[in-house]
Amino acid sequence: MSASSVIAKRLDGVTESATLKLNALVQSMRARGEDIVNLTAGEPDFPPPEEAKAAVRKALDENKNKYTPVAGIPELRERIAKKTNNQQPNAVAKFGEWKAADVVVSNGGKQAIFNTLMSLLNPGDEVIIVSPYWLSYPEMVKLSGGTPVIIEGKAEKKFKASADDIRKVLTPKTKVLILNSPSNPTGTTYTREEFTAIGNFLAKEAPGVWVISDEIYDRILFEKTEFVSFLDAAPELRNRTVTVNGLSKAAAMTGWRIGWTVAPPELTQALLTLQGQSTSGISSLVQYAGIAALDLAEEKFAEMVSAFKRRRRMALEILAKAEKLKVVPPEGAFYVFLGVEAFVKAGEDSMQLSETLIREAKVAVVPGTPFGAPNWVRMSIATDDDTLRKGCERLVEYFRAH
Ligand code: PLP
């Protein structure tokens, strides 16, 4: 029997990580003694907060190792509700506070989004996604039986969708719109006014459409100081918006797998049923770390955020020397998205160019193709200053020579 007849149809057309092949190339070149600068990291290069580590140790010593409630321990859900209320004062003023009962803690923001799509989509339902997008969105939509509908973001508009763009792709089958600000991979952020305009449009013209607002990079902002949570700008969508967040990026805790949804009761009940019959609650020990991280003052993360700001400035300064390279300065997250159209050969895209960059420039970046942007690559600034400088200089040298 061939493998394809063994594997369930629901996996047809769902793609595996596109960067595996490139990572293998980096490993094999390094094994041969080549000095490759790796700018592919999707996680902060900072350690987790000491307080989070101490909380896990304490929980372990206290034998906090039993199953927890599926949605997470009450103290953690309370902290998350409080954080969300602080980020959504307008929605709170109109509709009251989110409660611990509105929160489901999942294995990272990834499972939170997956659970939401699984709980909302019927076969053939459409999900609007703005490109360039986090590469898991369309694959998760497909796994959930839905159909991704892509709005092609334009660099001139900082890759953002307007209410008009959404109107053009809206159909009776549209069920969900996914928004992500600050964005992976572009670092773009929506303003309060932009979110309000989208919210007003959805409230008036798209009554059945839900919003998933992925706010996982909320703390990592460069020029603006104010983070805008979608619901704070569009409170009238309170009964059909799911706020997704977590500690992976903002608290440098990627491997701990702490993410969550804050959602209206009917959906939260479905999320609980799904998670209760699949993975159950997340690891008991890390939930105590989650509490500790959420209790920390903003200043605790100031060093990390200012390092990202400094590196962003340095990277932009160096990259500006490559004339044909298009750079849209990121406003948040920890990536710089580079337009490489001038360097992509006919019939190829950023997949092949990324391989060439590893072999010839000795720099690894992530191709934009799986993010829905075939003529772009994503460079991470979540690496130390010297490595980043070396990587940017090598890229500039390559691009200037080609
Ligand atoms: N959303 C975006 C935009 C991301 O970039 C990521 C991770 O790369 C996630 C969600 C999921 O994060 P995690 O599952 O690690 O919490």
Image (cartoon, grey):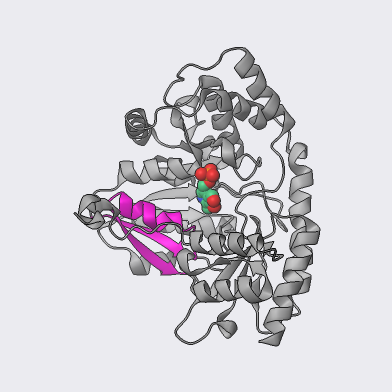
Pick the residue in front: 20 or 280. Answer: 20
Residue 79 at x, y percent in the picture: 59, 28
- Residue 14 visible in rendering: yes
Quarter occupied by the C terminus: bottom right
Question: What is the magenta range?
Answer: 124-152
Q: Residue at x 51, y 20 (%)?
A: 74
Q: Residue at x 77, y 44 (%)?
A: 302
Quarter occupied by the N terminus: bottom left
Q: Is residue 351 left or right of residue 11?
A: right
- Residue 187 visible in rendering: no
Q: Is residue 11 left or right of residue 378?
A: left
Residue 120 at x, y percent in the picture: 31, 44
- Looking at the picture, does residue 313 appear above or below residue 63? below
- Looking at the picture, does residue 371 appear above or below residue 296? below
Residue 223, picture quadrant: bottom right
Q: Residue at x 73, y 67 (%)?
A: 391
Pick out the residue farthest to the front: 32
Pick out the residue farthest to the top: 62
